[in-house]
Image (spheres, rainbow, N blue to C red):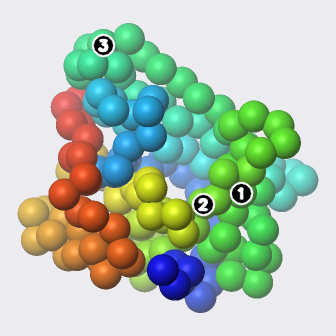
Amino acid sequence: MKPIPVVSHVDIQKFMGDWYVIACIPTFIETDAYNAIESYRLNDDGSIATTFTFRKGAPDGPLKKYTPTGHIIDKTSNAVWGMQFIWPIDAEYLIAHLEKDYRYTIIARNARDYVWIMARAPRIPGQDYERLSNIVKILGYDVTLLRKIPQQW
């Protein structure tokens, strides 16, 4: 398949902060995640301190926390990152969609194995979810694999 197109420019300061995971094609650690949040903070060296938290198995399940470090690879667009969970491997992280108001984003990978639909709020309207999942489909993903992440606060 063709490489996934990324957005032309990300204002990295505006992108920082909390993103609620609305749906994803999950990695093995996310298969039973609840209340998943990905948080970004720009470090002085330009790397991105990332904190991924969720409850395992239920809204009140054990809290899980991962702290990978993001590295901006394409400094022109700021839309291509490497996400390092373990050194020296940077997992591909592509900002394939970003709303103008930075309300929704889609993070993708060229392998089309994982994808994340994220929002600044824990819930989004149904028509917005349908529109975003259609974008995921256009990117070449099997949307039947999407798992809505329960956000029960």
Q: Earlier in the sequence, mark 3 or mark 2?
A: 3
Q: Residue at x 35, y 50 (%)?
A: 25
Q: Earlier in the sequence, mark 3 or mark 1?
A: 3
Please state which amino acid type lies under the numbered disc 3: Gly
Q: Is residue 149 above or below residue 44?
A: above
Q: Nearer the viewer, residue 2 or 11?
A: 2
Q: Is residue 92 left or right of residue 27?
A: right
Determine whether 119 is above or below 27 in the image: below
Label 3 secondary element: loop
Q: Secondary structure at mark 1?
A: strand
Name the residue beneath numbered marker 1. 82
Question: Label 2: how many residues lie within 10 Å, few (<14), some (14-19) or many (20+)?
Answer: many
The residue where tag 3 is placed is 61
Please name the residue that numbered disc 2 is placed on: 93
Q: Is residue 67 above or below residue 72?
A: above
Q: Amino acid at mark 2?
A: Tyr
Q: Position of residue 72 (x, y in %)?
A: 75, 64
Q: Are marks 2 and 1 in contact (CB under 8 Å)?
A: yes
- Say which element carries label 2: strand
Using the numbered discs, state the Cα–Cα distance from disc 2 to disc 1 in whole angstroms: 6 Å
63 left or right of 13 in image:
left
Q: Dot 1, how many residues are within 10 Å of its Cα: few (below 14), some (14-19), or many (20+)? A: many
Tag 3 and tag 2, C-beta contact below 8 Å? no
**Residue 108 place in picture, x, y as percent:** 48, 64
Q: Is residue 89 left or right of residue 28?
A: right
Tell me the residue at 65%/32% (across/down): 67
Position of the C terminus, as image quadrant, is: top left
